[in-house]
Image (cartoon, grey):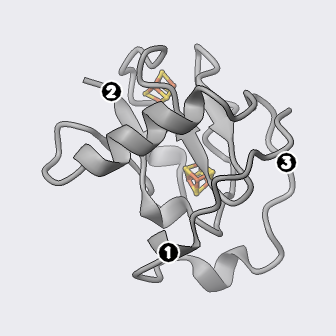
Amino acid sequence: MTYVVTEACIKCKFMDCVEVCPVDCFYEGENMLVINPNECIDCGVCEPECPAEAILPDTEDGLEEWLEINTKYSETWPNITVKGEPPADADDWQGKEGKKEFLSPNPGQGG
Ligand code: SF4
Ligand code: SF4
């Protein structure tokens, strides 16, 4: 298994998760992060750190699509290990449904 970042991260991108990961397996897109499932050691310490509750174990139902998204983008987006500045409107997007259409395929800056 692995943990994956899901829809709730889109446009929130608080980045509290990146600094606790012992194997630095978060990757940054323009408006969300993903986990590299091949690098994640399933320790689970990032899950409670996420204010948006966006990080879930892939053993939960219905996460196949998010596992694919995490796998795909972690191959091309830059690694991130230091918390950056969240989007100015991140709080407005927290908990909103239907954010998937806003997922940007563009890479973030990394850091
Ligand atoms: S803490 Fe949660 S919302 Fe913030 S970047 Fe990490 S997964 Fe996304
Ligand atoms: S479960 Fe552990 S290894 Fe996997 S992304 Fe979270 S902190 Fe990193």
For label 3, being within 8 Å of ligand 1 is answered: no
Per the image, label 2 sits on a secondary structure element best described as loop
Distance from label 3 to label 1 (Cα)?
A: 24 Å
Q: Position of residue 18 (x, y in %)?
A: 66, 35
Q: Amino acid at mark 2?
A: Thr
Distance from label 2 to label 3 (Cα)?
A: 24 Å
Instruction: Give the numbered dot on residue 86.
Output: none
The residue at the point 64 percent across, 67 percent down is 12
Which badge, 2 or 1, is on the more N-terminal residue? Answer: 2
CB-based contact (under 8 Å), mark 2 and mark 1: no
Which quadrant of the figure has residue 51? bottom right
Q: Observer-nearest residue: 106 or 25?
A: 106
Q: Amino acid at mark 3?
A: Gly
Q: Position of residue 10 (x, y in %)?
A: 57, 65
Which quadrant of the figure has residue 82? top right
Per the image, label 1 sits on a secondary structure element best described as helix
- Up the image or down, 54 lies above or below 74; here it is below
Which badge, 3 or 1, is on the more N-terminal residue? Answer: 3
Distance from label 2 to label 1 (Cα)?
A: 24 Å
Q: Observer-nearest residue: 7 or 19?
A: 7
Instruction: Give the numbered dot on residue 84.
Output: 3
Which badge, 2 or 3, is on the more N-terminal residue? Answer: 2
The residue at the point 57 percent across, 64 percent down is 103
The residue tagged 1 is 101
Q: Nearer the viewer, mark 3 or mark 1?
A: 1
In which quadrant of the rendered image does the C terminus lie? top right
- Up the image or down, 81 lies above or below 15; here it is above
The residue tagged 2 is 2
Q: Position of residue 73 (x, y in %)?
A: 56, 38
For label 2, being within 8 Å of ligand 2 is answered: yes
Q: Amino acid at mark 1?
A: Glu
In which quadrant of the rendered image does the N terminus lie? top left
